[in-house]
Image (cartoon, grey):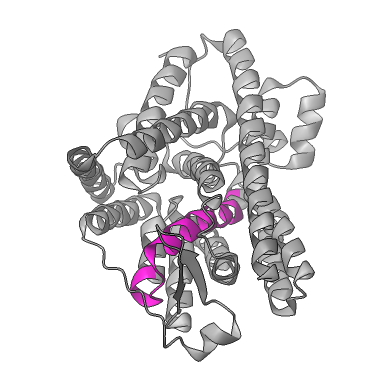
Amino acid sequence: MSLLTFTLIIFAGALLAGLLGSLTGLGGGVVIIPLLTIAFHIDIRYAIGTSLVAVIATSSGSAAAYVKEGFSNIRIAMFLEVATTSGAILGAILAIYLPTHFIAILAGIVILYSALISLKKKQDHLDVNQSSKLARILKLNGDFPDEHGNKISYAVHRVAGGYGMMMFAGVISGLLGLGSGSLKVVAMDNIMHIPFKVSTTTSNFMIGVTAAASASVYLSRGYIDPVLSMPVVLGVLLGSMVGARILMKTATSWLRILFIVVITILGGEMIYNGLLNKI
Amino acid sequence: MKKQINDQRIEIFLSYLLRWGVTLSAVIVAISGLLYLISHAGDTPHFHTFHGEHSDLTSLPGILHAMHQGNLKAFIQFGIVLLIATPIARVFFSIIGFILERDLLYIVLTIIVLSILMIGIFSGLGG
């Protein structure tokens, strides 16, 4: 295969990955890693480096759109970024010592888990009254406007538990090159009881910063190849922009189910190939 | 109330920063990538086995040096580095908001996050 054909096919695949990622809310990484390793037999180390760059592109691209709505909480983001960035660096260090087929199996498990989580019906834990003491000290409680423009205040719970989960999300992100947005949302929704409108945008904000921490380690380690990254970054960016448009215009529940099935198959393939030591 | 207005203004500024960073790096990657493809269309890609990048392309000084010699791959890599730097710049500039609000706790937390990011860049963990 010539480089031109290769680049065009990768671009098309990345376009699809960006589209899928934004329609399912899972981000580009969960598709990029299996696409590159299973479909194109690219070494998983290159795949991880490339995926991290794609994760940053989608995060920064969509954060720009989200922030105008003004729901993200910059204090929650900054406080939890201490956990995610230190976790990400830890994950990037850990990656040196773990065999690649083990990393592939772990990536498959996280991809399957993300797909499962996105199917579950979400429960909003809006709680006004009792925040934890730590949340008050850290000034994490805030408010957001509802559809009528009224202020809705929210209280943040179990700060230490959320911090721990975020650290874990950071390690996974740094080790596997995924955005691990699903783990971040678990920490913020289920543990800290931050309302969706705030947690989704805040998490998206943090994903790029987390990925940047490990991406700079991987850059100096030679995992990020410009020729491979070029079609992936451009494809994912374009795909997620188109995906965001579709998402706003149409009800896409059947499309989402279809995509989640695709992602589940990809995750299963990762585990299977990892177990056979093929990655 | 005043605090909120500050917060929002800064967040809108940051959102422009992110969009500008992503757009600029995408344009650099696209143009230099296209030029690279024109001259290397017939090459055989070999990403099946891991070689690691040439040391020219793994650090900013190396990339800048290679760009000076007209290396198109270095130009693409520069665009990628700019993309990685965009969220880091976001963290850096959000400190302004905390300084305006005289929020010492969050000034310190932002500095901690920046330091962790700098460890990732400069510590040689890439080894």
Say whether residue B90 is visible. Answer: yes
Res B123 seen here:
no
Q: Which of A202 and B71 is in front in this view?
A: A202
> Residue A127, position in %: x, y?
37, 79
Write down the region rendered in magenta.
Answer: A189-215
Where does residue A159 sit, x and y in percent of width and height? Answer: 47, 81
Find residue A126 and report its image quarter. Answer: bottom left
Q: Measured from the top left, where is residue A65 in percent x and y?
A: 52, 44
Q: Residue at x 80, y 22 (%)?
A: B69
Q: In this view, does A142 lie to the left or right of A194?
A: right
Q: Is residue A80 left or right of residue B124?
A: left
Residue at position x 59%, y 22% in the image: B30
Dominant SS type (magenta): helix
In this rendered view, identify the residue nearer to me: B31 or A79: A79
- Name the one closer to the observer, B4 or B77: B4
Q: In which quarter of the image is residue B124?
A: bottom right
Q: Where is residue B73 in the image (x, y as percent from the top left)?
A: 65, 25
Quarter of the picture containing the N terminus of chain B is bottom right
Horizontal side, residue A263 vs residue B105: left or right: left
Where A9 falls versus A229 (above or below)? Answer: above
Name the side, left or right, on which A174 lies relative to B112.
Answer: left
Residue at the outermost bottom position: A133
